[in-house]
């Protein structure tokens, strides 16, 4: 039996895909790179915005045709599976099974039942041990950086967000399990780890998130530690201190802001004002200048006036984010913001998004230019040079680096090397080996 998993969405979903892949491999199934070569295709879906959902349905449409030509099992998991549950079978009757986000370990059973010819197999139950997934089972794709779950679910209630529905309430893994997993990963050759959760800084697995960072950083041989993603209200002074003082914690913080208007933040139920967000950034003190800071914005939230949007443009100037990810508000089924009147015309929303992204591109370029002339550690992320002779690498600040090694020189995949930054462009930094 050959299987192919297609994953959309965030790192949490990526890592779920790695866990699911491991479960199938343990059953003796063989992973293949192309859906066309697989007997089982598993769609590991995202439903954060309508566009993500469209992609899933269009892939399902393609698979329906393929299924008419040859025997094929089709399973759906991830956030859309959890959100739609059995309704998926109505919309796409050729789906063989549906697996929820909190029932990952039920996958082999569901596949066996589907193979036995039982139609419409489904498990979207909430298994209390889902977050205790045995670490050795996961089959990781990246061999330089390992993803490690520390907390699942989210206890916030942002009015636009589907995640509390699709990922449930917060469940933290015991810290000893996390540390043991990282130790095992380092023994297996990984030197960089990214701790994952919908909201890592409300971690409560026997210590605080700041303490967890310190404990994981103590693992011998670990070089870089990252984490994603954080809610500003759970961003503590202790965490800020760990971030700026612990040399193993990569100098990068993603702290989603969503809007520069207090009025809109309130309608989003973000639980903070702009001043409170800025106060959290203030916790970083002097260390702030050594960090790269990124954020998320939603534009065109119901009721967003020109004035509200100008406040968002203003906050870009105040904070000078190194990067930001911005999206047009997408109404999600079952979320509280559906009840808000959403009468802003799409062209207005698009124009706002374009303005924000244009200004951010300038700020990102300015941020990149500040690196020129500096010598920084970067991790080699490619096994071969590109046609142009560049090696791809990544800095602690999460900048993409194009590294020139000189003709005929091989660079050590996965390792840290010192690079001198020679040029800045909007999307990457050019560098040479020191
Ligand atoms: N519409 C648009 N963007 C959204 N995000 C979350 N929900 C929505 C939505 N309904 C964005 C937020 C979040 C990022 C992961 O996706 O900015 O931080
Ligand atoms: Fe998409 Fe959010 Fe689910 Fe991640 S948690 S897959 S971003 S809906």
Image: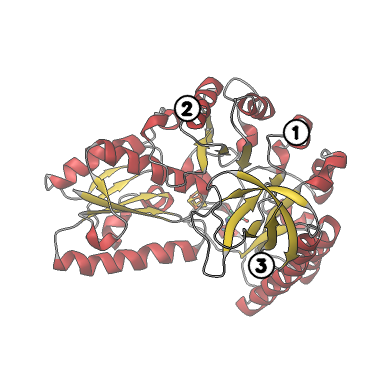
- The CA span between labels 2 and 1 is 29 Å
Label 2 neighbourhood size at 10 Å, few (<14), some (14-19), many (20+)? some
- Residue 184 is tagged as 2
User: Viewer-proximal residue, 133 or 349?
Assistant: 133
Q: What residue is drawn where x is 82% and y is 55%?
A: 319
Q: What residue is drawn where x is 71% and y is 58%?
A: 323
Residue contact at pointers 3 and 1, CB within 8 angstroms = no
Whichever of labels 2 and 1 marks the residue nearer the N terminus, that label is 2
Whichever of labels 3 and 2 marks the residue nearer the N terminus, that label is 2
Q: Choose mark 3 or mark 2, whichever is in front.
A: 2
Q: Position of residue 175 (x, y in %)?
A: 56, 23
Whichever of labels 3 and 1 marks the residue nearer the N terminus, that label is 1
60 left or right of 234 in image: left
- The CA span between labels 3 and 1 is 30 Å
Q: Is mark 2 within 8 Å of ligand 2?
A: no
Residue for badge 3: 300
Q: Choose mark 3 or mark 1, whichever is in front.
A: 1
Q: Position of residue 22 (x, y in %)?
A: 34, 39
- Residue furthest front as drawn: 408
Per the image, label 2 sits on a secondary structure element best described as helix
Label 1 neighbourhood size at 10 Å, few (<14), some (14-19), many (20+)? some
Q: Position of residue 132 (x, y in %)?
A: 43, 28
279 left or right of 70 in image: right
Residue for badge 1: 236
Q: Can the viewer see residue 133?
A: no
């Amino acid at each position: 039996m050959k299987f192919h998993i297609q994953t959309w969405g965030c790192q949490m979903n990526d890592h779920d895909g790695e866990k699911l892949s491991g479960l199938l491999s343990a059953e003796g199934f063989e992973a293949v790179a192309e859906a066309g070569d697989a007997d089982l295709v598993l769609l590991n879906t995202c439903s954060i915005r309508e566009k993500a959902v469209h992609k899933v349905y269009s892939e399902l449409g393609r698979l329906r045709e393929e299924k008419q030509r040859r025997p094929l099992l089709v399973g759906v998991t991830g956030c859309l599976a959890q959100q739609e549950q059995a309704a998926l079978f109505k919309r796409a009757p050729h789906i063989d099974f549906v697996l929820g986000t909190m029932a990952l370990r039920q996958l082999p059973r569901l596949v066996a039942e589907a193979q036995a010819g039982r139609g419409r197999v489904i498990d979207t139950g909430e298994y209390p041990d889902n977050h205790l997934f045995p670490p050795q089972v996961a089959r990781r794709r990246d061999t330089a950086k390992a993803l490690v779950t520390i907390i699942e679910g989210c206890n916030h209630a942002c009015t636009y967000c589907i995640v509390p529905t699709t990922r449930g309430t917060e469940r933290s893994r015991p810290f000893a399990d996390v540390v043991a997993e990282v130790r095992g990963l380092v023994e297996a050759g990984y030197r960089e780890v990214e701790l994952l959760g919908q909201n890592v800084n409300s971690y409560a697995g026997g210590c605080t998130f700041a303490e967890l960072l310190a404990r994981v950083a103590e693992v011998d041989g670990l070089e870089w530690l990252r984490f994603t993603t954080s809610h500003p209200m759970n961003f503590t002074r202790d965490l800020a201190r760990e971030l700026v003082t612990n040399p193993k914690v990569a100098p990068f913080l993603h702290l989603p802001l969503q809007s520069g208007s207090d009025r809109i933040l309130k309608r989003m139920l973000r639980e903070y004002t702009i001043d409170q967000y800025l106060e959290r950034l203030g916790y970083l003190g002097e260390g702030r200048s050594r960090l790269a800071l990124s954020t998320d914005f939603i534009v065109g939230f119901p009721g967003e006036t020109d004035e509200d949007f100008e406040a968002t443009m203003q906050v870009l100037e105040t904070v000078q984010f190194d990067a930001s990810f911005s999206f047009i508000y997408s109404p999600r089924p079952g979320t509280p913001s559906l009840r808000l009147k959403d009468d802003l015309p799409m062209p207005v929303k698009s124009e706002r998004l374009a303005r924000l992204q244009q200004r951010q591109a300038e700020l990102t370029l300015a941020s990149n230019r500040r690196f020129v002339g500096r010598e920084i550690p970067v991790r080699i992320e490619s096994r071969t040079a590109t046609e142009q002779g560049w090696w791809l690498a990544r800095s602690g600040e999460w900048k993409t680096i194009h590294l020139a090694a000189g003709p005929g020189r091989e660079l050590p995949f996965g390792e840290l090397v010192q690079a001198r930054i020679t040029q800045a462009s909007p999307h990457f930094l050019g560098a040479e080996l020191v």
